[in-house]
Amino acid sequence: MPAEPVAGHAIVLFDGVCNVCNSSMNFIIKRDAKRYFLFAPLQSPAGRSWQERLGLDAEHLDTTVLIEDGRAYLRSSAALRIARRLGGRYRLLYAFVVVPSPVRDFAYDWFARRRYRWFGKRDACIVPAPDVRDRFLPG
């Protein structure tokens, strides 16, 4: 799925009301020393705009999306590519890419279906802290 890139960055679209997703974005931000990743909640105007550009169904999309090098990666593929870019020991997780994506995505989807029940969700997307606001796409 080609899309116009943001020079020198990858974009992570995430469920902005999901507590697990918000914690995951904070995890990435803290470990992304090169500031490679930019972020947008799926529910935000910027997130919806990217979903439209990529031809993704915004009404039924509730997964992490990584937009890198003009391509969109979903679910486990997005998570593994993000881990690879974080470096250090997290890079080792990319080895799971050898597992067929239907198997990886089955496990990803199993957890995703239960995340609200187990970890809850917010009524609205979080507002990023001032020190990381520049990492979020406007809109």
Image (tube, rainbow, N blue to C red):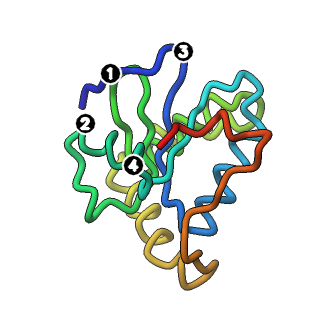
| Amino acid type indicated by mark 1 | Glu
Marks 2 and 3 close (CB-CB < 8 Å) = no
Residue position for label 4: 45
The relative height of residue 43 versus residue 10 in the rendered view (above or below) is below
Marks 1 and 2 close (CB-CB < 8 Å) = yes
Q: Which label number is shown at residue 103?
A: none
Residue 31 placement, left or right of 138 = right
Residue position for label 3: 8
Residue 125 placement, left or right of 13 = right
| Amino acid type indicated by mark 2 | Arg
Q: Residue 6 at what x, y percent from top left?
A: 45, 21
SS of the residue under disc 3: loop
Question: Residue at horizontal 64%, vertical 35%?
Answer: 135
Q: Nearer the viewer, residue 35 or 95?
A: 35
| Amino acid type indicated by mark 3 | Gly
Q: Which label number is shown at residue 53?
A: 2
| Amino acid type indicated by mark 4 | Pro
Q: In which quarter of the image is the N terminus?
A: top left
Q: Which label number is shown at residue 4?
A: 1
